[in-house]
Image: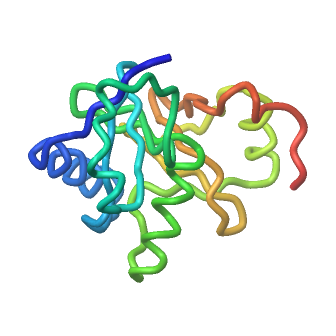
Amino acid sequence: MTTAKSLSRKQVKELLQSLKNQFGITLKDDYLVYRNSKDRVFLLKNDQNIEKINFEFLRTDRMGLYLAEYKNGFFRPSMQGIQFLVSEAKKQGIKPKNTLELTKEQAQTIFQGEELQIPNLPDSSGLILTFQGKTLCFAQAKDGKILNYIPKTFRGTTII
């Protein structure tokens, strides 16, 4: 079990700016943002009752939506986090930056836990991988390869 701390307004602003720079997605300011001791960031719907709870003295594993890992200014969304962010962008009429549409074979390769070779792909600190317009996951491009960040629990055969 870990403990969680509420992020200060400055830290939330920094996180939201990083999100905007990386993906062009603007997240509304009406969420409570917590970070646990493993640098995992969680979102909770803003509620007066939740704000009164001091999570520093509670041992919690997770709460709300596991949005991302956030270390040293690098924002690495979880699968559910990236799907949430893209759905929020669609609600606002924003098309996310750094999106890569995959073919069926490429999507299957990613879900089998393998790295994907794409020549002439520029290095990127973060990509949103999509298939037929649906958000799949977050990845990183480096040296013509897409580094696979899909958790092992989601790997295996895919239904595409």
Residue 36 rendering spot, x and y as whole percentages: 37, 27
Give the side of residue 118 with respect to residue 128, left or right.
right
Q: Which of 4 and 101 is in front in this view?
A: 4
Number of marks drawn: 0
- Residue at (56, 57) in percent of width and height: 83
- Residue at (52, 69) in percent of width and height: 87
Residue 46's image quarter?
bottom left
- Residue at (26, 58) in percent of width and height: 20
Q: Nearer the viewer, residue 1 or 70?
A: 1
Residue 153's image quarter?
top right
Give the side of residue 82 with respect to residue 7, left or right.
right
Residue 74 rendering spot, x and y as whole percentages: 29, 33
Residue 83 visible: yes
Residue 26 visible: no
Q: Nearer the viewer, residue 82 or 2?
A: 2
- Residue at (19, 53) in percent of width and height: 17
